[in-house]
Image (cartoon, coloured by chain):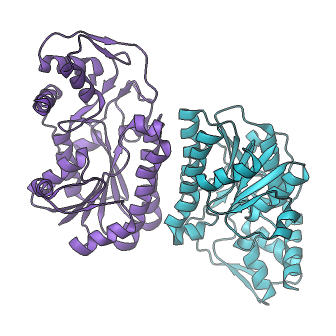
Chain colours: A purple, B cyan
């Protein structure tokens, strides 16, 4: 089995590469970011092609590795904030990249099982209910809109050309090596000796936090299963709701000490109140989440402290 | 008032240019296709920039004409069949072009009223009912999917950046100078002395046929109205259903002679059974369609015969 990962050098991509390589698959990657030889070997990645996901590079990778059996498509924008600051850049990374990939698969590797990483951001403003895969999609940020557009492209290629794909909508993925977002921000401030943690929002925002190690196992499991319908959509969330306030408390508690936490009450643009997965579809895969939020956060804090020693 | 038209050198673009110029507006164009000087003057187009719709060319046009007050965005793929043969090319022309345009407007001309030409193809498989603008969108061709994606981009730029736009979903536009599709095909075969006209489909497919001269007036009218909501969506159809069989009969009758017409009964991929506009939203504009299908087709046949003399 030959596996390709676009964006293999990103936060989730590196975990997925290692997970798949440990299972004995030949894993090759394509995307942005330099990867030195020792690191490539440590991850268990065969070939790494540092470049744009386009037909030239996809074709070049195939010369080295043969055509992929399964392709995990992780390349794309990865930040709501960046997508608001530079929407065209996010469009280009997410949508245009996916359009080139789908076209290459159509013409060069139509039998490949494509697993596309999308986001719960496609649901938009969220809901007090857990989101089912068939819930209305109404993204509130360019990031979410562009993820929805790549889902649409997958449907288009399935309807017209029979190209099958599985779309996995990830929720709030965290873990060691994630150097942005809430956990990184809180740890950074704690490391700088903050006397109080002031946060935006109300703290009651509910999210479905998933440890990246579990997410890598989930994606590997989905890649194994194959695909029996033109386009499958799966929520890659645990169904467990944890508020931002509880996350902050966990961080402070893992860090040690008693730092007070305050919330501004002002909601950030593009930031839905609640985004938690309904897990009905995922349950059919008999996949089990193994890392509870508290344990995962404790590991994150330990990693962070290791970094700054 | 400074008006820009992307795709101004296309089938609808040329009619729209002339319509707006005759109303006294300064009209400038950007897009593909050579346009010689006499023809540019005949259309009443000020500047014509023959090139890609990108920030460089948009900026260059602004140096000559100042920023646009209204921009009609007509550039993009224009054929269901071509979008199936070359889906990435259609994506690139339609979606990527629109993404670049929206980004340029956001950064350089956020006050401009954007009128985007979309298509009834976004509705997909169609329905025996007339389509309302709020009907479900479920395109069955890459062409329709890509048009839907540009509508989504408009929504994204409206939601996040307050960029206002009006989306006009055109139905089956025909008229002199359209050198493809059903009318062109039928006239071509008649001119070659066909003894019988054999057509795909059942002949009972219902379409909302609109003469391009009416469509140009409609777009001009929509440009005049301005925009009072973030994204307005208007069906640019007449609400009159005419079957493909009736169109073929009209063509033969206008041509003269008694050629029998036969249908294969086999539906083409991406070809919905019925696509006719509900005109509730359009009625509020007090726009009136002036050219009945029979008269429009008669004019088309006259134009065609003129071409081949």
Q: Residue B203 appears in which quarter of the rendering?
A: bottom right
| B8 relative to A123 in the view: left or right | right
As drawn, which residue projects farthest toward the front?
B63
| B45 relative to B126 in the view: left or right | right
Q: Quadrant of the N terminus of chain A?
A: bottom left
Q: Residue A4 appears in which quarter of the rendering?
A: bottom left
Indicate the position of residue A209 as horizontal and vertical percent values.
25, 31
| B72 relative to B160 in the view: left or right | right
Would you place residue A125 above or below residue A117 in this image? above
Say which residue appears at 37% left-offset and 18% top-offset: A200
Indicate the position of residue B120 as horizontal and vertical percent values.
65, 54
Would you place residue A126 above or below residue A214 in this image? above
Indicate the position of residue A123 as horizontal and vertical percent values.
42, 36
> B181 or A74: nearer the eye?
A74
Q: Is residue B2 visible?
A: yes
Indicate the position of residue B143 as horizontal and vertical percent values.
57, 61
Q: Is residue B141 visible?
A: no
Q: Residue B94 appears in which quarter of the rendering?
A: bottom right
Q: Count of labels shown?
A: 0
| B17 relative to B264 in the view: left or right | right
Q: Quadrant of the C terminus of chain A?
A: top left
């Amino acid at each position: 089995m030959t596996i390709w990962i676009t964006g293999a050098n990103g936060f989730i991509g590196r975990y997925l590469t290692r997970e798949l390589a440990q299972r004995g698959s030949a894993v090759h990657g394509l995307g942005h970011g330099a990867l030195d030889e020792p690191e490539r070997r440590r991850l268990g990645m065969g070939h790494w092609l540092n470049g744009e996901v386009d037909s030239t590079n996809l074709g070049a990778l195939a010369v080295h590795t043969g055509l992929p059996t399964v392709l995990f498509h992780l390349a794309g924008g990865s930040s709501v904030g960046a997508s608001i600051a530079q929407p065209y850049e996010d469009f280009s990374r997410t949508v245009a990249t996916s359009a080139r990939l789908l076209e290459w698969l159509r013409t060069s590797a139509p039998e490949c099982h494509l697993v596309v990483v999308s986001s719960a951001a496609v649901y938009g403003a969220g809901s007090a209910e857990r989101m089912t895969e068939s819930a209305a999609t109404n993204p509130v940020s360019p990031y979410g809109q562009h993820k929805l557009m790549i889902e649409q492209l997958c449907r288009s290629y399935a309807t017209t050309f029979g190209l099958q794909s599985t779309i996995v909508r990830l929720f709030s993925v965290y873990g060691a090596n994630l150097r942005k977002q809430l956990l990184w921000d809180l740890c950074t401030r704690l490391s700088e000796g903050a006397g109080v943690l002031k946060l935006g929002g109300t703290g009651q925002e509910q999210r479905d936090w998933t440890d990246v190690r579990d997410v890598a196992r989930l994606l590997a499991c989905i890649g194994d299963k194959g695909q029996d319908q033109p386009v499958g959509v799966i929520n890659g969330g645990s169904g467990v709701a944890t508020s931002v306030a509880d996350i902050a408390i966990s961080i402070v508690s893992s860090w040690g000490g008693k730092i007070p936490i305050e919330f501004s009450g002002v909601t950030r643009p593009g930031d839905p109140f609640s985004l938690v997965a309904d897990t009905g579809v995922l349950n059919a895969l008999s996949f089990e989440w193994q890392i509870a939020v508290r344990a995962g956060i404790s590991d994150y804090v330990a990693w962070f402290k290791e970094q700054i020693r």
